[in-house]
Image (cartoon, rainbow, N blue to C red):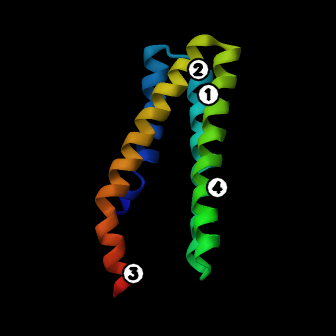
Amino acid sequence: MVLLRFLDLVILALALPVFLLAGFPMLGYAAAAVAWLVQRLIQVRLDRAARESEDLRRVAGITAGSMIGRGWLTALTIFAAGLKENDAGLSAAVLVIVLFTAYFTITLLMRPLDTKELSS
């Protein structure tokens, strides 16, 4: 179960040899990896802050701000890589889409288990 929660990070690690063997731009991999890891770290810390708060407006503000800010961070990082090297931006964008799809799917599948743990 723990491996499923971090499937996006496993995919990120597995993407490195794919980028190397396929000759994809390493700047694209680096941009996607840095953006993804930083936004995931921010998410973990802000989710913890939201769970600890009892003020619903604060929880909503943290959650919404986190989603918007992390999206912008990732998009601007991809954009910067694309400005430096066109193919790097494309490869970074594709990798982030794959990572997000895996993360979002696992989050949806694990949500019922998370709510059962919280109610116990």
The residue identified by callout 4 is: 65
SS class, disc 1: helix
Q: Nearer the viewer, residue 12 or 55?
A: 55
Q: Check the image and name the residue furthest to the front.
A: 57
Tag 4–tag 1 contact (CB < 8 Å): no
Identify the secondary structure beneath mark 4: helix
N-term mark: 2 or 4:
4
- Is residue 41 shown to the viewer in this render? no
Badge 3: residue crowd in 10 Å (few <14, some 14–19, many ≥20): few
Using the image, determine if residue 104 lies above or below residue 28. Answer: below
Q: How many other residues sit within 10 Å of disc 1, few (<14), some (14-19) or many (≥20)?
A: many
| Residue 13 in picture, x, y percent from top left | 47, 39
Left or right? Give the position of 86 relative to 104: right
Distance between mark 2 and mark 1 Cα atoms? 5 Å
Task: Give amino acid for label 4.
Answer: Gly
- Looking at the image, tell me whether mark 2 or mark 3 is earlier in sequence order: 2
Location of residue 71 with respect to 62 vertically, above or below: above
Amino acid type, mark 2: Gly
Q: Secondary structure at mark 3?
A: helix
Q: Which kind of residue does numbered mark 3 sit on? A: Leu
Residue at 57% x, 33% y: name it. Answer: 32
Q: Residue at x 49, y 34 (%)?
A: 96
Q: Quadrant of the N terminus?
A: bottom left
Q: Name the residue tied to disc 3.
A: 118
The residue under label 1 is 78
| Disc 2 + disc 1, Cβ < 8 Å | yes
Mark 2 Cα within 10 Å, few/some/many (few <14, many 20+)?
many
The residue under label 2 is 89
Image coords of residue 24 (percent x, y): 50, 16
Q: Which one is nearer the viewer's eye here, 104 or 63? A: 63
Q: Earlier in the sequence, mark 4 or mark 3?
A: 4
Q: CA distance from mark 4 to mark 3?
A: 24 Å
